[in-house]
Amino acid sequence: MKILLVEDNEMNRDMLSRRLIRRGFEVAIAVDGRQGVEMASSEKPDLILMDMSLPEIDGWEATRLIKSNPETDSIPIMGLTAHAMAGDREKCLEAGCDEYGSKPVDFADLTEKIQKLVVGDAS
C-alpha cells in the first residue's frame, strides 16, 4: 500500500516515514501543499496523510484541491494537526478529509485509522 505523506517538518517526516516503511507501507513524501496536490495525481497513493499547517498551500486548501479533482477525489485523506483544538476534527472533515489525527502522532491509533480508511470499514 502506498501512502503519500505531506509534511513540511523534517523531524516529523523522518519519524513517520521510517515507522510506516517498517510496517510495510510504501511512502512517497511531499514537503508542501502544492507538491502534495501534484503528487496525489502523479503517485496515485492509496492514502494521503496531510499535515494541515503547510507552506505554499496549506493542508486545508490542498485537501480541497485533491477532493475537487475527479482524478484524485476518491483517495482517502487523513488530516494531521498539532493544534488539536476543539473543532479541528470537524474543520478537517469539512475541508474534505476522511479522518483526523492529532500530533504528536499516536502511531498505534494512526495505523488503526489507516487500516479502517483503506479497507473501507471506517464509520
Image (spheres, rainbow, N blue to C red):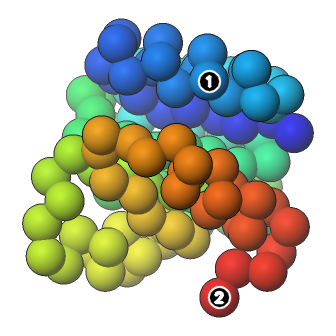
Q: Which sits earlier in the primary sequence, circle 2 or circle 1?
A: 1
Total numbered labels: 2
> Which residue is rendered at x = 52% and y = 68% of the image?
99
> Which residue is rendered at x = 19% and y = 59% of the image?
84
Q: Position of residue 83 (x, y in %)?
A: 15, 52
What residue does disc 1 label?
19
* Horizontal arrangement in the rendering, residue 79 relative to residue 22 (left or right): left
User: Disc 2 vs disc 1: Cβ atoms closer than 8 Å?
Assistant: no
Quadrant in which the N terminus is drawn: top right
> Which residue is rendered at x = 36% and y = 11% of the image?
10
Whether residue 56 is visible to the viewer of this picture, yes or no, is yes
Q: Nearer the viewer, residue 34 or 2?
A: 2
For label 2, the crowd category at 10 Å Cα-Cα, with few meaning under 14, some 14 to 19 and many 20 or more, is few
Q: Which circle marks residue 123 in the picture? A: 2
Say if 90 sits above or below 46 in the image.
Answer: below
Element marked by disc 1: helix
* Horizontal arrangement in the rendering, residue 71 relative to residue 34 (left or right): right
* Horizontal arrangement in the rendering, residue 55 relative to residue 77 (left or right): left
Amino acid on which the number 1 mark rests in the picture: Arg
Cα distance, mark 2 to mark 1? 25 Å
Q: Nearer the viewer, residue 53 or 111?
A: 111
Q: Position of residue 51 (x, y in %)?
A: 37, 41
Quadrant in which the C terminus is drawn: bottom right
Element marked by disc 2: loop
Q: Nearer the viewer, residue 24 or 68?
A: 24
Amino acid on which the number 2 mark rests in the picture: Ser
Residue 39, by quadrant, is top right
Residue 67, by quadrant, is bottom right
